[in-house]
Amino acid sequence: MISKEQIAAAKGPLYLRLKAAIVDAVMQGSVGPGEVLPSERELAIQTGMSRVTVRKAVQELVESGHLVQRRGSGTFVAHRVEKVEQALSMLTSFSEDMARRGKTVRSIWLNRTVDAPSPRETMALGLSAVDQVVRLERVRVADGVPLAIECASLAATLMPNPMLVQHSLYAVLSELGLRPERAVQKLSADNISASEAELLGVPAGMAGLRIERVSYLPSGRAVEFTQTLYRGDAYDFAVELRMPAKQEKVQVR
């Protein structure tokens, strides 16, 4: 993939030359997104560099998001991510958002269970101490790229069987006559943890956005409590703001 001649032709410290050569190999298609990189030992032999130098170059490319390391599997070229702009003023599902963009959607299921609610789920959904929740946890994937980790909770009295949801939760809720009509969302910035980064195929510590949403039926009952972690490099969120119809006059005393 990388030759000693490429390294010799570059300028600067050896690890920076190797970084540039790896990025160049990716740009030229010598190694594509999702493909495994040669091991540190193999790269050291190919380039004539020490493994310490190779490790420094690779680690900086992992930190910059060009490469992804997976325990027990190796180092891979990160997938190029097309930014998605999501309107916060619209109550839609991930499946609906991606379908409008012509993307192929799938889920990597982590958990589909009926369980006792956590304190946060109890408060968000207005449950009692004896109620149970259906909990749906999955990685949301579009065109082969993991974009978000989602955990949706619903009262088991509304939808007792979690296996009803194979693709779109909102499609199932619509069939049951439980499609929400409004929602309240809370957004917060956060760094992606090591376990979350492994699921999303990104470096640990990358910027992410967490959104908590409580959705309501026309009756006012809370139907869905969803906690989602979005990749910071994949999403831009937009909201339309309007001036009030009549501005109140502020008296200065």
Image (cartoon, rainbow, N blue to C red):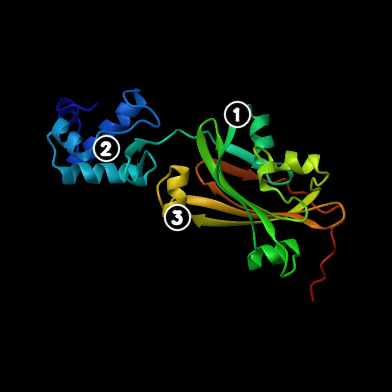
Q: x%, y% of residue 184?
A: 73, 56
Judged from the image, the secondary structure of the residue bearing numbered disc 2 is helix
Most foreground residue, 179 or 68: 179
Image quadrant where residue 21 sits: top left
Say what amino acid the circle numbered 3 marks: Ser
| Distance between mark 3 and mark 1 Cα atoms | 27 Å
Quarter of the rendering containing residue 139 = top right
The kind of residue on which mark 1 rests is Lys
The reply to whether callout 1 and callout 2 are in contact (CB within 8 Å) is no
Residue for badge 1: 103
Residue 113 drawn at (x, y percent): 62, 52
Identify which residue is drawn at 33% across, 40% down. 73
Towards the viewer: 171 or 164: 164
Q: Which residue is mark 3?
A: 193
In this view, 113 is above or below 57: below
Instruction: Please identify, in this view, whether the residue under mark 2 or under mark 3 is nearer the observer.
Output: 3
Question: Is 217 above or below relative to 165?
Answer: below
Closer to the chain start, of discs 3 and 1, is: 1
Report which residue position mark 2 lands on. Answer: 19
Task: Describe residue 189's horizontal placement relative to residue 76 as left or right.
Answer: right
Type of amino acid under label 2 = Lys
- Mark 2 nearby-residue class (10 Å; few <14, some 14–19, many ≥20): many
